[in-house]
Image: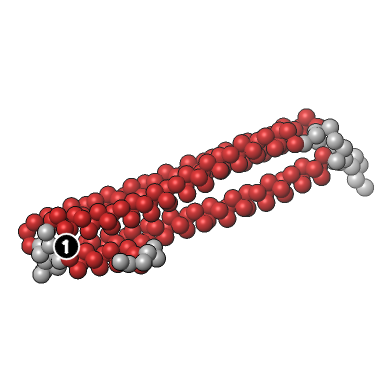
Amino acid sequence: MNNYPDTVMTPPTPEAAKIAEIQFAYECAEEINDSCRNLFEAIRNSLDQLKEKRTAANESLCDVLAKKGSLRKKDYERMMDEIHAILDEKEQDARDELSSFLRDQREFALMLKDLILNAIDFSSPDLARRSRQLREELAAIASGQEERKAAVVKRLTDFQSAHSKIVAHLESLLHKREGIGAKDIKDVKHLVDREWGIKSN
């Protein structure tokens, strides 16, 4: 026979519940902010590296043109300026979308704190049910943010992939034995147009 008294599970006091919910809110908010910062830094570094590679390839092509190119430097620069303008525009679009997403994430983190701190009546007799309901609502909001995050990351990775193809094509021109002509640069422009669905002239 068990002589020990049965353990009775008592519900948390309103004060304890409030502390737990506030802690949950701040932990979630900080996780979101950390995720945003890490994502921003990783993508910004990647975009900067891509642009550095493109600039290096362009400078090397200028050097090759000076030695054995069949295309005048002025014509080359005019054609490449058009290509760079498109790439810079697409890069800025990607950066703007990332910035918008990160701004919304920060607002979501603040809303999360306010929602927890202000939306629950901790003296309510059905505190457990309301807390569970709030967690479910927050989970649904967070799920929507994750879907948007996936869409933003896909757009950025698509840009990175397209940009890498273009840089690789530019770098391949450095090894042409017969020199670089106008057709070679037009081929690069056509590649840019195909990657972003731009109607070629």
Residue 10, visible in the rendered structure: no
Task: Provide residue 36's location: percent of width, then percent of height.
Answer: 50, 43
Task: Provide residue 55's location: percent of width, then percent of height.
Answer: 24, 51
Q: Is residue 140 above or below residue 32?
A: below
The kind of secondary structure element at disc 1 is loop
Please give the name of the residue rendered at 23% of the width and 61% of the height, measured from the top-left corner.
170
Task: Please state which of residues 25 and 10 is positioned toward the viewer in this rendering.
Answer: 25
Quadrant of image for the C terminus = bottom left
> Residue flagged by tag 1: what amino acid is it?
Leu
Residue 118, visible in the rendered structure: yes
Task: Please state which of residues 45 and 101 is positioned toward the viewer in this rendering.
Answer: 101
Relative placement, left or right, of 154 versus 199 is right
Please give the name of the residue rendered at 38% of the width and 54% of the height, measured from the top-left corner.
90
Q: For residue 174, what is the image quadrant?
A: bottom left
Task: Provide residue 157's location: percent of width, then percent of height.
Answer: 42, 57
Task: Please state which of residues 104 and 25 is positioned toward the viewer in this rendering.
Answer: 104
Task: Please state which of residues 136 and 9 is positioned toward the viewer in this rendering.
Answer: 136
Please give the name of the residue rendered at 65% of the width and 39% of the height, measured from the top-left corner.
112
The number of discs equals 1
Please give the name of the residue rendered at 36% of the width and 46% of the height, measured from the top-left corner.
45
Relative placement, left or right, of 31 versus 190 is right
Q: How crowded is mark 1: few (under 14 residues within 10 Å), some or many (20 or more)?
A: some
Relative placement, left or right, of 180 versus 99 is left
Q: For residue 77, what is the image quadrant?
A: bottom left
Which residue corresponds to mark 1? 174
